[in-house]
Image (spheres, rainbow, N blue to C red):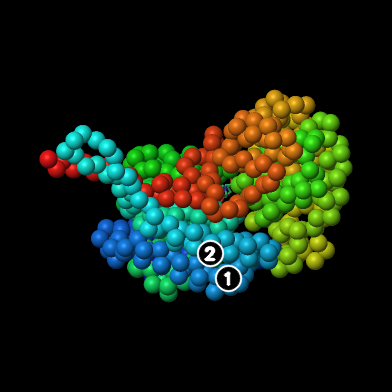
Amino acid sequence: MSTHFINNRRVPGTTGETIPVIDPSDGQVFAQLARGNATDIASAVRAARAAADGGAWSRLAPVERGRLLRKLSDAILAHHDELAMLELRDCGKPVKQAKADATACARYFEYYAGACDKLHGETIPYTPGFAVMTVYEPHGVTGHIIPWNYPMQIFGRSVGGALAAGNACVVKPAEDACLSLLRIAEIAADCGFPEGALNIVTGYGHEAGQALADAAGIDHISFTGSARVGTIIAQSAAKRHVPVTLELGGKSPQIVFADANLDEALPVIVNAIIQNTGQTCSAGSRLLIEASAYERVLSLLAPRFTSLTAGPASMDLDVGPLIRQSQLDRVNGFLSEAQQTKLRIIAQGSVSAEAPSTGFYAKPTLIADVPASASLARDEVFGPVLAAMSFKDEVEAIALANGTEYGLVAGVWTENGGRALRMAKAVKAGQVFINNYGAGGGVELPFGGVKSSGYGREKGFEALYGFSVMKTVVVRHD
Ligand code: NAP
Ligand code: MG
């Protein structure tokens, strides 16, 4: 697989250098990727430009674009298990998670297939003798920088929306998560996507990724990843006045009032932090509990955490390995700090005896009494670690919920309807879930952040406006 995918063909990198692909379940190298650079990015951008500027892709009627996207959705489903197994090995995703991601990727293309011919503008009443209309046009060539935690899902969400709006795409996946996307690009070519509509360059973020952010010929950048790199991307894009969508990190609160239905809440709360081994931007990683229910909720959660097991992706346990050694070191660093600062570790799951010692396994952990000032309460762990704290009333719940630099998602658990609505209004986040929580769920639901969680929206119909430019046409006809 050590090739890029440009103009519907696998092409070797210009330098011939490669990057090892590691299986997180056992830490072993099992493949190589092309180490892309600015020259490779330039050739992908040229291919996309030709497709977008009068090429076959740009000449397709929206209904035909939609049919191609639908064909790709069906083809992804036809290759569902193959794609899931690629991601299982590449990213250490347990079987159920890997399969859910392949299904979600197909669903994005299905959703956006139906949207291609429905992105229409308006007419505007104006001075007599004039007709005014607005039209949505594609940016042209969009760049997509994808993280490693949900490669297929985020590819579907970002590239699906951009293609639907009529853009040609250049994609730089994370170096830890390229295999499924290279295969999907091949499948798209087999479906009949015109040359240059979808191009993938693999490589390191600071090389191929930076080259994409800097490339002349890119008209819009969709970046999903860390807040730190988001800043770099926005600065690069600003030099050429290129618009950017930033889907960044989160420290999302799950807020539990004493009147909550705990039978419903508890399994969702646990899942919101262990899903994808905690490596989810919208993970519910802070648990805010009303003081009068605090100890009760913790004691009910404790056995649920103790029973969790981490193991190789193929065993399909509660959690898999983390993506790489440095991520395991990061998670263990938070756990060591919790021990050193004598935080209350309520419960900890285990690592399967069958897990290879060379894999990257962390124990799912519930930690209580975490001060709002602690790094565990402020920073993304990106692992299966839930930080709990108590609040005395709604005012304090809102202050804690909004007390980090992030604002991506929030969950509120209460049987009081008025309070649910007050909380939904007061919490600063891009999505608020009342009596449910959807980390990543629902392709129809516009998604994105406020504050350091980013700006712009992907998912849902809303994403299409971001992937388009509105043009106002004023016709004088008197
Ligand atoms: P990251 O380090 O920011 O990397 C994200 C992507 O950017 C990767 O493809 C990476 O490539 C690339 N990159 C790194 N440095 C770059 C540079 N200087 N110029 C251009 N591209 C560069 O994030 P990550 O560790 O992969 O992902 C985890 C983060 O993503 C978390 O903060 C998480 O919350 C966030 N995330 C957000 C969402 C959302 O929708 N809001 C969804 C998923 C993840 P390499 O990996 O090859 O270096
Ligand atoms: Mg890998």
Residue at the extreme top of the image, as rendered = 395
The answer to which image quadrant residue 87 occupies is: bottom right
Measure the alpha-carbon separation of dots 1 and 2.
9 Å
Numbered disc 1: secondary structure: helix
The answer to whether residue 414 is above or below residue 394 is below
Left or right position of 395 against 18: right
Q: Are marks 1 and 2 in contact (CB under 8 Å)?
A: yes
Residue at screen point 64% across, 49% down: 438
- The image position of residue 145, as x and y in percent, is 47, 52
Query: Along the horizontal axis of the image, is 342 left or right of 150?
Result: right
| Residue 478 coordinates in the image, percent (x, y) | 12, 40
- In the image, 402 versus 413, the foreground residue is 413
Disc 1 residue type?
A: His
Which residue position holds label 2? 106
Left or right: residue 300 versus residue 474 is: right
Q: Residue furthest front?
A: 128
User: 340 or 169, which is in the foreground?
Assistant: 169
Quadrant of res 285: top right
Residue at x 77% of width, y 39% of height: 260
Q: Quadrant of residue 376?
A: top right
Q: Is residue 234 visible?
A: yes
**Residue 116, image x and y in percent?**
40, 58
- Say which residue appears at 83% left-offset and 35% top-offset: 294
Residue 461 - label: none
Residue located at (77% from left, 48% from top): 264
Secondary structure category for the residue under label 2:
helix
Q: Which is more toward the observer, 286 or 9?
A: 286
Q: Residues within 10 Å of mark 1 (few under 14, many from 20)?
A: some
Residue pointed to by mark 1: 80
